Amino acid sequence: MRLTRHRRWLAPAAVAAAVGLALTACTGDIANEEAGDVDCGPYEEYGTFDGAEVTVGGTILDLEADRLVESWADFETCTGITVDYQGSSEFEAQIAVLAEGGNAPDVGIVPQPGLMNRLAAGGWLIPASEPVEANTDEFWSEDWKTYGTGTADGVFYGAPLMASIKGYVWYSPAEFEEKGYEIPKTLDELTELSETIAAEGDHKPWCVGLESGDATGWPGTDWVEDYMLRLHGADVYDQWVAHEIPFNDPQVAEAFDAVGEYLKNEEMVNGGIGDVSTLVTEAFQTGGLPILDGECSLHHQASFYETFWNPEGGDANTVASDGTVFGFLLPPENADDPLSVTGGGEIVVAFREAEEVEAFRHYLSSDTWANNRVGLGGVISANKGVDPEVASSELLVQSIEILQDPETTFRFDGSDLMPGAVGADSFWKGIVSWVGGQSTPQVLDTIEASWPAS
């Protein structure tokens, strides 16, 4: 799961050049706010600090970064802590290099439990404080707490932050109504719908973007993970992620081939963009936008994609069942199968031990922060203290309710849980090679060979 998402954590110029970071500064108008304009009651438990600063790094960029900064503006005003966020699309690739060189930010918003475990194994992370852990126990399920706990040492390093539900299929409600399309209830019905759209000849059914800088290919892994869960169930999914079955197991091949019926099929993709080869050159942020121009009908992407329908931050395109665009969950194999979804999120880790750092992490683990951020729009959280009704769209309200429903079978994004050599490397690259023409056995054998021996 990933979101292409502002300072003192920057290395000196020579080091930054060596690691090739391309960073975008993002600061708020907090200095212009008067504490008297803010209700500081909800922030009293975090204490007050004189001139303290906390630097933060992550993958969150652009509009989402602006909203992130806004979400802690009152915290800054009331505590006196200046929070300096810097986002980078290269964060995942470079954070270990920065940590090893002593140049990591105070706080990292890490989008992969596998990466968190790598950082923990390097000895660079500070265990979470008692208040952070107490909030996690109160507001998050045990599964979510596990994602912030080191697999090797059992130490709790950080609380979850935001979340997403993968496997939404975005579409135009107006087109569905005009052409009499129905929301598919099974994977076979999704195939039938896709074939119907293709046969009509107006446009290709699906539009896809897999490009994401060093992480190009990750949206394709989301497809495979959704099919693994739906075709083979949660137990097999867990075995796959934990390497209790090999990556080239026939069940994995079946999921790849099912996805290939769309992604490797010239009749199915790439509507409004080009042929199959354009999947790996089209940015994931823009991959679904041909729906708005009637040049494709379907786009597979997570709940967080809501933000990209209005790239300038306006409200021209509404996300609603009767709006410009909406989404349905990728259906199950059988109509009566229980609701199973994949999803992702971030873990808030610390590289510096300081009271102001833990005060900030304490706030980010709270229901106060979660409601503030969700209310700003475009995202959800699995924090049980979130009121679903503060979400910015009908789809995101639904997504929060799904995460809070104890009957939902939820599984974290598989590539994010796998060792970095696989989940953030060979799996992503394998998707690119596979879409480019390599066979399923070739790709799966290569990924299996990359799995670390221990």
Image: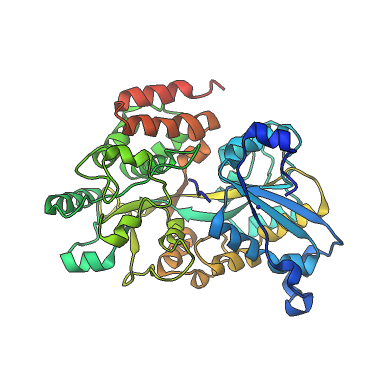
Indicate whether 120 appears above or below 77.
Answer: above
Reply above or below: 429 against 284: above
Residue sitting at the far right: 50
Q: Residue at x 32, y 40 (%)?
A: 278
Which quadrant would the C terminus be assigned to in this image? Answer: top right
Q: Position of residue 61 (x, y in %)?
A: 56, 53
Is 292 left or right of 363, judged from the image as shown?
A: left
Q: Position of residue 366 (x, y in %)?
A: 66, 62
Q: Residue furthest bottom?
A: 37
Residue 104 position, x and y percent, is 72, 41
- Residue 101 shown left or right of residue 420 in the figure: right
Identified at 64% across, 60% down, the residue is 138
Whether residue 61 is visible, yes or no, is yes
From the viewer's perspective, tell me whether residue 262 is left or right of residue 162: left
Out of 126 and 52, give the one closest to the viewer: 52
Q: Position of residue 409 (x, y in %)?
A: 42, 51
Residue at screen point 44% across, 58% down? 308
Residue at 29% over, 29% down? 437
